[in-house]
Image (cartoon, grey):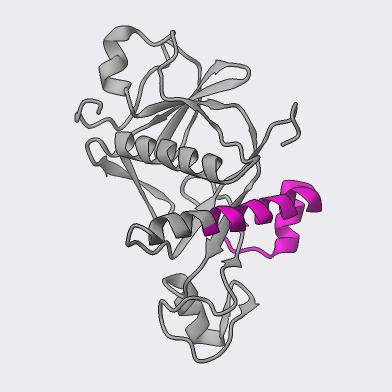
Amino acid sequence: MSTNKLILSSNLESFLPLINKGKVRDIYSINPSTLLFVTTDRISAFDVALATGIPSKGAILTLVTAHWASVLTNAIPGLSTHVLTLNLPSQIPHALHTTYHHRSMQVRNLIPFKIEAIVRGYLTREAWDSYQKDGTVCGIRIPDGLKESEAFPDGPIYTPSTKADVGEHDEDISEARAAELVGSLEYADRIKELSMEIYEVAHAYAWERGLILADTKFEFGLDVEKNE
C-alpha cells in the first residue's frame, strides 16, 4: 500500500492540469480521453468536506473501488466502468510513486449525469425516518407494519437524488425529474436498470460473506463516442 502519510491535497499541478477538487478526490487531465483520480485522505460527512483526514483512507477507497469494478464487470455482461488502471501516468515523476501509488487511478473521461442513482433494499436510516412520518420513502408508498431495517417486501426500490456541489446537500427527486436532469427517458431508464442490477449483484456478493448491503448509490457517465 502507499505511504501512510496524511494526504489532504495531491498538489500535482506541476505535472498535470487540475480539473476539479471534489470533497475527497482531486481530478487531473492526462489527455482528452483520460483523467487521473487521486483520492486524498479528506473526510466528507453529510455532504461537507472536513478539514481533518485519516491516513491511508484514500488508498483504501481506491482499492475498494477497483475491487468492486472488477467484481461487477465480471458478473454483469456489457457493464463498463470508468476504471482503466491503477498505474500512475508517465507524467508523474517516479519519486512520487510511493506517495500516490494505490490512491490514484486512471479513468475514462466521461460526461457525468447530474444525478445520484440510489437503491435501497432495507428500511433503514433516513428511509426509516420518512416511513415513520407518513408511510413513504422518497415519495414511494411502502406497506404498513414494517420494522426498522426490515427488507422491503416487494424488493429493492430506486430513489434518485440530485448531485450536489461541494457544501450543498443532495435532494430526493422523482424518476420524472431524474429523466429531465439526465436529458432523456432512455438514459434515465438505463441508469435505473443498471442500478437495480448492480445492487442485486453486490447484495448477493456481500450476503455470501456475512454482510448486508442495506443501500447504496451510483454515479453514471456518458461515453459520447460509444453512446454508452
Query: Residue 178 magenta-drawn?
Result: yes
Residue at the bottom extreme of this rendering: 145
Q: Is residue 188 left or right of residue 201?
A: right
Check if residue 10 falls in the magenta segment: no
Q: Which quarter of the figure is the N terminus placed in? A: top left
Q: Is there any visible trace of residue 169 in the rendered image?
A: no
Q: Quadrant of residue 174?
A: bottom right
Q: Is residue 60 left or right of residue 191?
A: left
The relative height of residue 217 versus residue 142 in the rendered view (above or below) is above
The residue at 55%/33% (across/down) is 82
Quadrant that contains the C terminus:
top right
Where is 144 relative to 222, above or below? below
**Please, what is the dominant secondary structure of the magenta stretch?**
helix
Q: Residue 31, percent across and down?
A: 58, 14
Please give the name of the residue rendered at 26% of the width and 41% of the height, measured from the top-left corner: 53
Q: Residue at x 65, y 63 (%)?
A: 173
Looking at the rendering, the stretch of residues picked out in magenta corresponds to 171-200
Q: Is residue 91 visible?
A: yes
Which is more toward the observer, 211 or 219?
211
